Image (spheres, helix red, strand yellow):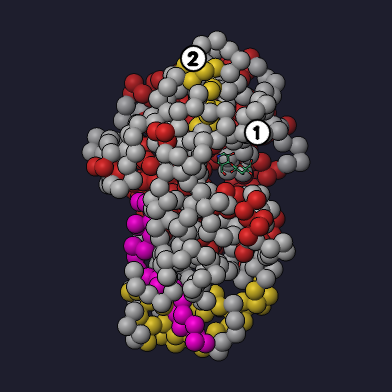
Amino acid sequence: MSNVFFDGKKEVSNGRPQIFVDQAGYFPESRKTAVLPFPADMFSIVDENGEKYFEGAVSHFGYDECSGDDVYIADFSSFKRSGSYRISAGGALSALFRIGHGVYSKLFRDTAKAFYYFRCGCSLDEKYAGEYIHDICHTAEAKIYNGEGTVDVTGGWHDAGDYGRYVTPGACACAQLLYAYKLFPKAFDGLDLNIPESGSGVPDILSECRYELEWMLKMQREDGAVYHKITTMRHAPFIMPEDDKEQLIVFPISSMATADLCAVCALAAGIYRPFDKVFSDRLAKAADLSYRWLKANPDFVAFHNPKGCDTGLYGESSDVDNRYWAAAEMFVLTGDKRYSADFVKLYHEGFDRDDYVRVALGYSVIGGLGSLAYILCDHEGRENAVANALKEQFSNEAYWLRDKSKASGYGASMEDWDYYWGSNMVLLQHAMKFILAAKFTGNSEFYGYIEEQIHVLLGRNPLGISYVTGTGEYRCENPHYRIEESIPGLVIGGPNRERNDPAAVSLIPEGTPPMKCFTDNKDCYSLNEVTIYWNSPAVFVLAYLTGYADNSGSL
Ligand code: 9MR
Ligand code: ZN
């Protein structure tokens, strides 16, 4: 890659562009803006040979709290010609970006394919993995913590930069992918991920999800309760997965894991039914078994890491949202009004003043998936008043996020406190909420804000960096990931004003504005890690953008 900005160095401050654009690009008909953190009168659009195509006036947005920048905007919405360009103003240039109909297509495929690279319990072979091969990993039986014997819980996706496998984030990621398929099937038509199951007649995204679901089914105990996680006692050092030979341990059950497994299996049972009746029945049976356990065990069963264990906690302080989601999916699957009654009871009594739980999309607070299930279902016996109230709640949430996006110089629907560990998940889930609100209300105003969030993720941000590996001229290249840094399509955690790791504390000065609390450094696991549930909302949003937005704009 030869260009004036990207010199292969890792530091954010090194050679970065000074005008910030979405480095994947913009749809021709969409609103298109670049951000300048310095004053200028005019800007122009130039192509790679320096030829000028467009000139426009720069406008002053004003001071932007989350970045600490005095922001200027170059709006080139009226320029619709497909091609590759840079913005030039005041002697500075932007990174390269495209205008065109397919600007997110490769990215969509990359983010969906990324799940294959997270696979555990199999080897990744050259035919599918290219240069990112590794041997079969984590195949030993796992010891049951504080119990007798061992159990086979092989398979599934590694969670993140570590090799743990955890049920609640796994269920969240899988469900978001399944909903992407359910809502935007056209986007997955013919989407060839080049995975071992490709060509089987089942959409690749469903085959990929099945890999996770098959593992999750093994995490279910005979009585329906579900183990919270399977990991080693401590995080592995930076070694390849096949070299991680420490004793695997299956940790105690939790009611969150049980409810989430129930919910995602019920959701999946409906989706796989036309493709594989036997698998669908297995899923439905598992969901039913876990639901029975939940009914027989109404108390919250929390999860705590035992002494000496430092792998992910994924602890939660309530399981009501998980049970709410499970009830909704069971109602969708079976049409049995008893589940609707359970759901409606929790809707009224479960959340007290914590209204946001009903629109939260996970991993930890996940009531929004229950609401989504209930809204989408058309069974007789659904309480329409509840479904309508939930639609309205999604709509109110979207108005609130719209106002935040308008107030941000970068168009991010975020406030300073949103920039915590995994803030790109927050950003992407906001894009999901704009999609859902547009779908439920028909309010087309929300569409534009979906793209605004994607632009922030892909480089129109105060560091001018694309937070997805493999996309953009100036992009993250050093994820906190044990396997292979250069795998494309991995969504990076993102700016985190809390700087929850020692390297981030030492590299990022106290008082740095939230949106700038990031550096592309492998050691900074609270900034630079990757996870399955940061990728899944990206797939959801990109499925909408590639399959729908650019064609008709309607859902
Ligand atoms: O994504 C999780 C983040 O929200 C929490 O603040 C953080 C600390 O508990 O943990 C993150 O999850 C990590 C998990 O515990 C282990 N696998 C890697 C995850 C991403 O960093
Ligand atoms: Zn593994």
Residue bearing mark 1: 315
The span from disc 2 to disc 1 (Cα, nearest Å) is 24 Å
Residue 212 visible somewhere in the drawing? no
Q: State whether label 2 is within 8 Å of ligand 2.
A: no
Above-or-below relation of 147 to 242: above
**Amino acid tagged 1:** Gly
Report which quarter residue 293 is drawn in. Answer: top right
Magenta residues, start to end = 87-110
Residue 464 place in picture, x, y as percent: 52, 68
For the residue labelled by badge 1, is the local secondary structure a helix, a strand or a loop? loop
Q: Earlier in the sequence, mark 2 or mark 1?
A: 2
User: Which label sits on residue 150?
Assistant: 2
Residue 399 place in picture, x, y as percent: 63, 58
Quadrant containing the N terminus in the rendered view: bottom left
**Amino acid tagged 2:** Thr
| In this view, the mark in front (2 or 1) | 2
In the image, is 440 to the left or to the right of 416? left
In the image, is 123 to the left or to the right of 86? left
Is residue 118 inside the magenta stretch?
no
